[in-house]
Amino acid sequence: MRPESLYEIHTDDVDVDSPVLVHALSGFLDAGGARQLAVSHLLATHENQTIATFDIDALYDYRARRPRMVFDTDHYESLEYPELLLSLVRDERDQGFLLLHGPEPDFAWRAFTDSVVQIAERFGVRRSLGMNAIPWPAPHTRPVGVTAHSTDPSLVSGRPTFVGAIEVPGHLAGGIELALGAAGHEAMGFAAHVPHYLTQVEFPRASIALLNEVAAAGDLSFDLTALAVQAQVSDREIDEQLTVSPENAQAVRDLEAQYDAIVRGADVALQLATDGSLPSGEDLAEQFQEFLRELDDKGRSE
């Protein structure tokens, strides 16, 4: 498959010199919905236009990720096909940047990354920035940590590192970074650390952390007011759940102690107790989800 057959450019009239390319493909590596929340916020609060579309039929497995369909009484009302788009977005200073967003492709990965390289060269992209979010054994009461990586070590020099060489499942965020780096382009990425017990619920503070990193690395300026309000509501709901569960509250206090010890430079391993005295991340997540479902049910009944 030829890379250029995967996408269609709708306009070359992009009045931006050497733009930044931000890529955020939904699906894998999106703990707490942080990446999707960040994309939704950018598109809802900043001027944007679609400048290219990808051939979703060539890239997406509809049977593995069935799109939403509505049946109403005696007929099918609608079918929401997914879209993989390249948008031109303007920040608070009217500085334009490119945003690649939509579902991570299931097929044609090499052709897709070649397409991204072609697009980057067509529009003179100076740097690419990827957003991800990963589960992390840290409490929600502390600042959100971020792992930064780049094809150019100088771009992340001096930042803390959290792991050495490890094998991870392949994903296109990493594939895009590798392909752009191999083609001689600056490519960076950021992974927000989402408390492992909150991976299945929305955690807006991680989205704010990602957008702050993108803004700094891309010399961009975002209005994060609405997202900050979402984060305040989220934090309040999480704290309310903790007050009714002594076990969960104790687990978070233990995580806080471990986090604070590491920040102080103590020789303490960042791991949960293995003697079974603390709820697992899955147990905490299930209880938080049940709490949020109850809030939703209450809201529907009022």
Image (cartoon, rainbow, N blue to C red):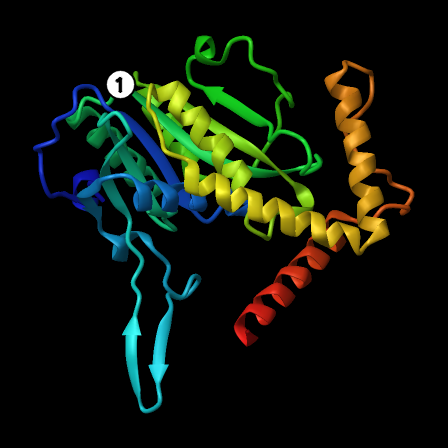
Q: Residue at 35% across / 73% down in the picture?
A: 69
Q: Residue at 51% across / 9% down in the picture?
A: 157
Q: Answer with left or right where residue 221 lies relative to residue 296.
A: left
Q: Would residue 174 be seen by someone viewing this image from the given angle?
A: no
| Residue 263 position within the rendered picture, expressed as x and y whole percent measured from the top left | 73, 19
| Residue 33 position within the rendered picture, expressed as x and y whole percent measured from the top left | 51, 47
In the structure shown, which secondary structural element does the residue marked by tag 1 occupy?
A: loop
Of residues 254 and 160, the one drawn nearer to the viewer in this rendering: 254
Q: Residue at 68% across / 61% down in the picture?
A: 291
Q: Would residue 264 be seen by someone viewing this image from the given angle?
A: yes
Tell me the amino acid under the disc marked 1: Arg
Q: Quadrant of the C terminus?
A: bottom right
248 versus 4 height, above or below: below
Judging by the rendered image, the residue that carries numbered circle 1 is 126
Q: Residues within 10 Å of mark 1 (few under 14, many from 20)?
A: some
Of residues 219 and 102, the one drawn nearer to the viewer in this rendering: 219
Of residues 55 and 97, the one drawn nearer to the viewer in this rendering: 97
230 versus 177 height, above or below: below
Figure label count: 1
| Residue 210 position within the rendered picture, expressed as x and y whole percent measured from the top left | 47, 31
| Residue 113 position within the rendered picture, expressed as x and y whole percent measured from the top left | 31, 35
Residue extending furthest bottom? Answer: 74
Q: Residue at 54% across / 43% down in the picture?
A: 231
154 versus 250 height, above or below: above
Q: Quadrant of residue 82?
A: bottom left
Q: Answer with left or right where residue 291 lies relative to residue 258.
A: left
Q: Quadrant of the N terminus?
A: top left
